[in-house]
Image (cartoon, rainbow, N blue to C red):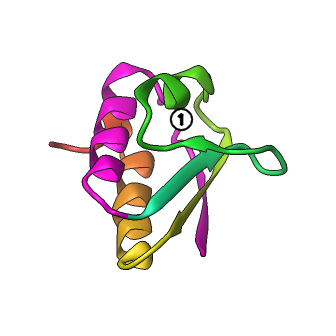
Amino acid sequence: MAEITVTLPPGVGLHARPAALFVGAAAKSSCDVTIGRPGEPGVNAKSILGVMGLGAKAGEEMVVTAEGDGADELLASLKEILETPEGGHA
C-alpha cells in the first residue's frame, strides 16, 4: 500500500469542484483509494459523498492511500489535484 500526506493549500478545502476532480481521478483507477485525516480512518476516495463529508478545510493535512497496480502514479496525480488551488485546471 502506498501513502502520501498532503496539506490543502490556503483558501482551498475539499468543496464541490476540487472534491469532484479528486473523486473523478480516483474513480478512473482500479486501485483501492482512501482519504482521511492523520490518525483517523479514511473514506472511499471514489465516493463524492464520503470525500465531501470529511469537511476538509484549507491548511488541513490529509492522508491518501492507494493499493493496486499504478498506486504510486495515482497518488502523484491525486496529490497534484489536492495541492493546486481550485483543484487543478481540468
Furthest residue in direction left, as rendered: 90
Query: In terms of depth relative to the viewer, which is nearer, 87 or 53?
Result: 53
The residue at the point 36 percent across, 78 percent down is 70
Name the residue that disc number 1 marks: 10
Residue situated in front as seen by the camera: 58 or 56: 56
Q: Can residue 51 be seen at all in this image of the molecule?
A: yes
Report the amino acid beneath label 1: Pro
Q: Position of residue 13 (x, y in %)?
A: 51, 29
Residue at 76% from the left image edge and 44% from the top image edge? 41
The region drawn magenta spans 1-30
Q: Residue at the spot x=58%, y=32% of the render?
A: 58
Per the image, label 1 sits on a secondary structure element best described as loop
Q: Is residue 11 visible?
A: no
Q: Quadrant of residue 72?
A: bottom left
Q: 37 or 87, which lies in front?
A: 37
> Is residue 5 shown in magenta?
yes
Whole-percent x, y for residue 34 in the image: 57, 51
Across and down, in percent, residue 18 comes to 36, 33
